[in-house]
Image (cartoon, coloured by chain):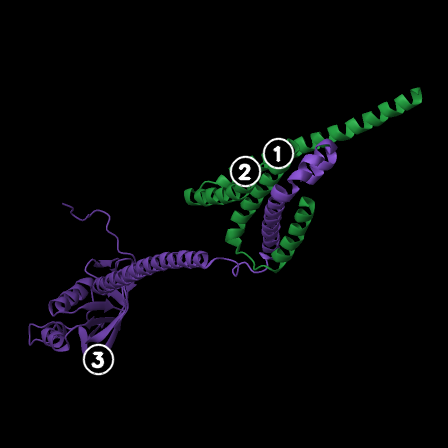
Chain colours: A green, B purple
Amino acid sequence: MILIAIILGCIIGAVIGIFAPMVSYTYSGYLAIAIIAALDSVFGGIVATLKKNFNLTIFVTGFFGNAILAILLTILGQKLNVDIYLAAIVVFVGRMFTNLAIIRRYYVDVVMKKIEEKKSKKKVENEK
Amino acid sequence: MQDICNMTNRGERMKFKIKFNKANIAMSISVFAVCIVLVTVMFIQFRTIEQVNESDIENMREAELREQISTYKSRYEEVNAQLEETNKTISEYETRIESNQEASELLDEELKQSQLLLGKTDVVGEGVVVTLTDNDEYSIVASDLLDLVNELRFAGAEAISINGIRILNMTEIADIYGYIIVTPNQRLVSPYVVKAIGNQTYLTSTLSLKNTGFIDSYTSSGRSVALEQQRNIEIPKYEWDIEANYMKEVTE
């Protein structure tokens, strides 16, 4: 059911995004930071799910909170003439890579376990 | 996401199925919403970035455009101020050039005046022509010419020439080996035509005083002298350099 929700959400989101009005170039920078923050939250959520400590409230608040915070920090950086969005990108993308690595290891472990089980089963059958 | 998780962990599947009705629906809805938001924003961003180069100015905010306009305005004002300053300096230079020209014109005039007074220019004007000729009884000598020149100067002659040679105040007239020589090294021969520019009446009256005047005294002593008044007497300039080797201007 959640998988269906994800796919449906993606499709509807794409349709809305295609027909939605364009954003001015100045705001697109903030939007990009928000997207990076949101993606980071999504990967964080996936990792949490794999580790079985997923919390919906934390996920949703992190998703929106991180995005808004990133935008606010970027605006503040522009006011201060410091490229704070660089720090945000470094943090978010770095975390995304770590999370992706955790996910990859998890599935590699799962697949390896399956293969080993099959081998041991075959061995047991052969011995029988 | 939990579906994937569940499929891999078959043992715990039953637990999630129990939860399915309550928590799972809420989770599905929220994940659905999150997905919509994320993908929508992403697509908007894609389109924005794709089209941004095609119409740069249109995508800018009004405030940004205003800012640019104001910066351009200030820049324009700056340039304008610079232009004004430059124009001012140009006009200053022009006035200076004009004043310079005036000064140089004044100098030029002064120089011309000095040249004229000194005798370095061809001059023309009213005056008298006195012709002295050698005759059988008496031939003219240098002192006669000196006398005449002296007389003319006394009568207010401004420019004097003998046979086309300008006579200045430093000109020497002397007899050398039977010839009359005028410095620098010009030999004069009869007839001696002495031209003088000045007030005609003064000159004529001074020269032709009864008995004691130049003409009378010389004709009576047997020399042939002729006096003639002319309107336009041309006297050439002194053709040589005037040098001052020993005298210097006194500086205080």
Q: CA distance from mark 2 to mark 3?
A: 125 Å
Image quadrant where one finds the N terminus of chain B: top right
Pointer 1 chain: A
In the image, what residue occupies the spot 54% across and 51% down?
Answer: A28
- Looking at the picture, which amino acid does disc 2 mark? Ile
Observer-side mark, 1 or 3, equals 1
Dot 2: element: helix
- Looking at the picture, which amino acid does disc 3 mark? Arg
Total numbered labels: 3
Instruction: Name the residue that disc number 3 marks.
Output: B231
Pointer 3 chain: B
Instruction: Name the residue that disc number 1 marks.
Output: A48
Crowd class of label 2 (few under 14; some 14 to 19; many from 20; radius 10 Å): few
Dot 1: element: helix
Closer to the camera in the image, B211 or B237: B237
Q: Is residue A105 left or right of residue B162?
A: right
**Residue B139 shows in the view:** no
Dot 3: element: strand
Could you tell me residue A87's position as x and y percent? 52, 37
Image quadrant where one finds the C terminus of chain B: top left
Closer to the camera in the image, A93 or B69: A93
Could you tell me residue B10's position as x and y percent? 74, 33
Chain-order first, disc 1 or disc 2: 1
Could you tell me residue B64's position as x and y percent? 45, 56
Q: CA distance from mark 1 to mark 3?
A: 128 Å
Which quadrant of the figure has residue A45? top right
Q: Is residue A125 left or right of residue A31?
A: right
Instruction: Name the residue that disc number 2 marks.
Output: A58
**Residue A1 shows in the view:** yes
